[in-house]
Every structure is written in C-alpha cells, then in structure tokens.
Amino acid sequence: MSEAFPLPLEALRRRPDVEDPTLQAYDATDLLLVERSLEEIAAAELSGTDVLILGERHGAITLGLAASGLRGMSVYQDRLAHERALEANAAELGLGGSYRQLSDVAEAAASARLVLWQLPRQVGAVRRTVAELAGVPSGALLVAGGRVKHLSVGMNAPLAEGFGAVEPQLAQRKSRLLLARRNPELVLAPAPEDRAAVSVGGRRLELRGAAEAFGGAALDPGTKLLLETLAARGGMEALSPASVVDLGCGNGTIAAWAALAWPAATVEATDDSRDAVASATASLEASGVAGRVRVVRADGGDHLAEASADVVLLNPPFHQGGTVHTGIATKLMRQAARMLRPGGTLFCVWNSHLRYRPRLERLVGPTEQLGRDRTFTVTASTRRG
Ligand SMILES: C[S@@+](CC[C@H](N)C(=O)[O-])C[C@H]1O[C@@H](n2cnc3c(N)ncnc32)[C@H](O)[C@@H]1O
C-alpha cells in the first residue's frame, strides 16, 4: 500500500510531539483515507478547496494530498503539537501554504464536497463534530476511519443519524474506513452539556466537558487524590504562592481548586487541546473563578518565562495517541522544572507502576512522597537552585 503513496512517509516527523523509534508520524488509516479520497477527487473532479480534513495528526493526510498536486484543503486539528508538526513537515517538504488551518469545523462545512476524518475515540466527540457538519452540502462524501481497535459500533449511530447511511469498508492493516453520503434532511441535535458538580479537597467545583477534552466533565481519580492529599496536608495556605500553573489542565479541575485554595495567587492553566481549553474555560466560569485564571492553549508551558512560577501542579498523560508512553510526561516535567523558580514546588500525581520518582529527582530536584492509594502516588519536588 505505502509504495504507491504520493509522499515519502519516512520524511514525516512528529516534532514538537514526542519522537521515539517506537512512535510513527502516520498510520494505516491515514494511508487508506488518502487513497480513497484520491479516487473520489478523480471521479467527481474535485479540487483541494473542496476538501475538509478533520483529526489530522502530523500531516500524512494533508501532505499526501498536497504531494498529489492539490491545494487549498481546509484542516482542523484539536492539538497544538499536531498543528505545529503539520506546519513543520509542510515546510520541510516544500509544501508550505498548501492548506489552510481552521479554528472551527463549521467554518468550512458549507464548501466541503469531501470530508476526510481520522475519527476520535470518544463517541461523544464524534457526535459533536457530526452536529457541526450540518452545513455540508447534499451528496458530499464523508470518508471516516480509524484503527479497528479504537472504532466502536456506537460511532455509527451519530454518523448515520446526522450525516447519512454508513457503509463500513473491509478492514485493511487493522484500520477501517466508514463511508457516508450527505443527506441534508438529517441534522443531529447538539449533545446535552457535559457537566458535573464535585466536592474535592474541601472545595466545591462545577466541571464542564468538551468533546475531546480528557475525561469530559468527570473528576479524574488521580487528580482527586492529588487535591485531597494537598488539602489534608498542613501548611498549604502558608505556602501562599504568588503564581501557580496547572500544566495540562484538561477540564480545569486543578486550576479551579488552586484559585479557590490560594485566593491571592495568579493561576495559569495550559493545555494543547482546543477542547480542553474550551472545557477548562467553561469549568472556571461555572466555578466562579474565571477572572482569576488565565487559560492558554500551549504546548506545555513553552510560552511561560523561566523561573516564573512558585507552584506547578501536574497530572501528566501517559498515552501518546494509542500507545502507553512516558515521553509526554517527561517533556512536561522538564517544562515544569524550567518554569519553576529555585525553591518552587512541583506537585505531581502519577500511576505508581510508572515509578516516576527518580525521573522527578533528576529533572526537577529533591522529591518527597506525600500520598499514595492503590493506583496513584502524589509527590512534591523542590526545584533545585
Ligand atoms: C491526565 S490529563 C489531566 C487533565 C487535568 N489536569 C485533570 O486533572 O483532569 C493530561 C492532560 O495533558 C494534556 N496534554 C497533553 N500533551 C500536552 C502538551 N504538550 N501540552 C499541554 N497539555 C498537554 C492533555 O490534553 C490532557 O488534558
């Protein structure tokens, strides 16, 4: 399959996403999406501006089409690291300017005659995006796909209810495409708001979810242990940090808690996912602390000055796409060390089997265990001077 692919796939890189010999910058779904879309482009005589690409990662779909001569494709990406990887790969392959980046799916729906979609894993995220595709014109083809192990039959329902009858294709190389033609009579109602009211670490928080945001509106069990441990520990108020960072904020639980626990502090919440930023913003608003927290879409804290934070709070991801990988946690720990002032503290919660303590000692400084349950460990690392 890849011999006929229009792009030298080995030239694609993942940076600034984690790079590692075990992680690829493309998968079989990308290849199937490009191959099937080139057939449709030839058959329906489409141009690049007719194409809308969703769920693009490091650029295999967009640049596969660009290398076939297409220009002007519209691309929507949730993660900033993916946006930057696509941009860097396009520049390196001499394909810069071959596509336009969207900040909103609905923006390009009305002009799309072909929609290519690397499906997210959450049915809720599929549902939300299908609702945003209501403006796609009659007869447009949707080519959606994913790794077989990540597709669920539950995804067919929002696709069929909101777009058109779904034709699943035979699986190839453990990936499968789902095809549907736009039936304009179908319009999926937006999903009800994902919300939860929780009490954690002595504070009441109102959480809000958004499609691809980690865990939706739910309180993460690791985060729960982190905040309960900090609340139970004497002297937290005396810590009185002036600046606090919630690194990888997801739905904003930690930032909202920190804003309430340290009323004099400036709190910064960052995440590289658009949906996480939307979800954190809504949670902070609903918890009454929106004015106290700045939410920024960023790759970790690369926009924050060195030695500018007194406290960093981190519940790092341990997945890289579908693979369990510690690279992203290491990258965020390094960033925490960079943004902490000497003597500042990184409070971190992690799955105990990952044994992060030596890594925290090496990257940040002396590390003490504050709490532990059957699954997670909470640590405090003091930034060495
Ligand atoms: C385990 S979740 C924790 C979410 C949230 N802090 C909580 O406690 O529920 C990790 C978060 O890190 C975010 N993330 C992953 N890579 C990131 C990066 N390079 N920069 C910023 N955030 C990132 C993910 O989007 C996700 O929201």
Image (cartoon, rainbow, N blue to C red):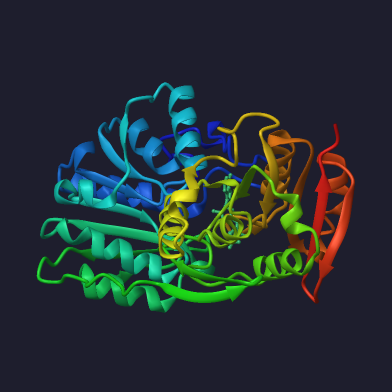
Q: Give me the residue at 40% from left, 72% from top.
A: 194
Q: Could you say where residue 281 lies in the image, as x and y percent from the top left?
A: 43, 55
Q: Could you say where residue 174 lies in the image, as x and y percent from the top left?
A: 52, 63
The answer to which image quadrant residue 224 occupies is bottom right
Residue nearest the observer in this picture, 244 or 364: 244
> Above or below — where is 180 with respect to 26?
below
Report the number of discs.
0
The answer to which image quadrant residue 68 occupies is top left
> Above or below — where is 351 with respect to 73?
below
Judge whether residue 21 can be spotted in this image.
no
Quarter of the image that includes the C terminus: top right
For ligand 1, which image quadrant applies? Answer: bottom right
Judge whether residue 240 can be spotted in this image.
yes
Residue nearest the observer in this picture, 222 or 64: 222
For this view, does 60 lie left or right of residue 313?
Answer: left
Residue nearest the observer in this picture, 36 or 105: 105
Q: Could you say where residue 45 lies in the image, as x and y percent from the top left?
A: 15, 42
For this view, does 374 lie left or right of residue 7?
Answer: right
